[in-house]
Amino acid sequence: MDEMNLTDYLAQGGKLTSPANVPPRYRAELLKLMATFVDSELAGAAGFADAINAGPGIKERIAAAKIVLEKTDNADKVLKLMGEFGADTARYANHHPWTARLDRDADIGASRTEHDMRLAVFNYPLAGWGDAVVMNLLMGRAVGVQMEEFKRVSYQPLAEAFRAIAPVEARHAELAEEGIERLISEGQGDSLQASVEYWWPRVAASFGIGNPERFEALKSMGLRHTPNADLRNTWEERAGSALSRQGLQSG
């Protein structure tokens, strides 16, 4: 299949199954998508690892450790696919400063740092257990929305990886909601609300500002399906509902 026919094939919902039949531009965009996911998972896991011993009880520490383990494993699933495109997977995990964070009051919007491809939200530090749980809930709901998009990508091996990852990530958001419920019962509602107001705009920024031309190009390759604004609106509804169940307000 030549590149012109391949473009039409993808635009009509076709799937690719091997690096061997992937055109250059598609390869570049696919690797960018995978790197953003892997880097965000590794940076998120590294940040949450520091919060494990801040957990108020054994159950919470086990849950936090499980999240760190599973996020690292999710990153590995996608990193293995990057390896099939030539990425140096043995070097990758140690190449970036995954624990690096900006100042708490830094404001970089949706931009990335020079370190890696992590979403901007993973450049901000956590401030204690309650703050970590709030961030995990809001970002967990965002990942859930993104997973619905990722499970439909036209590179079949990646779509299959995301279908395996999605329920694991969904459980992380559920654990966060359980954690918030406990903290609310202990009278920590005011500090949790302050964390919501801190993290809400930063998680929202992870959906990007939206570039219609770029979106249409990615859509024609089967790498995107739903505009950023629609994804963000869905997240706002779901995250807002999760917060309201705990008596908290969206940011």
Image (cartoon, rainbow, N blue to C red):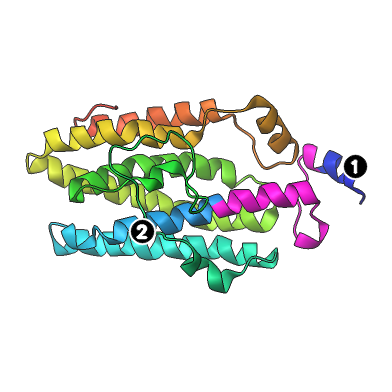
Q: Residues within 10 Å of mark 1 (few under 14, many from 20)?
A: few
Question: Does residue 29 show up magenta in the picture?
Answer: yes
Up the image or down, 108 lies above or below 90; here it is: above
Residue at image location 27% in from the left, 59% down from the top? 64
Up the image or down, 90 lies above or below 130; here it is: below
Q: Name the element at disc 2.
A: loop
Q: Amino acid at mark 2?
A: Thr
Residue at image location 14% in from the left, 44% down from the top? 183
Q: Name the element at disc 1.
A: helix
Relative depth, front residue between 179 and 209? 209
- The tag on residue 99 is 2
Question: Does residue 107 show up magenta in the picture?
Answer: no
Residue 228 appears at what percent x and percent y? 55, 30
What's the CA distance linking mark 2 and mark 1? 43 Å
Residue 198 appears at what percent x and percent y? 27, 34
Q: Residues within 10 Å of mark 2 (few under 14, many from 20)?
A: some
The residue wearing badge 1 is: 4
- The tag on residue 107 is none
Up the image or down, 234 lies above or below 81; here it is: above
Q: Which stretch did the figure color magenta? A: 10-35
Residue 33 appears at what percent x and percent y? 60, 48
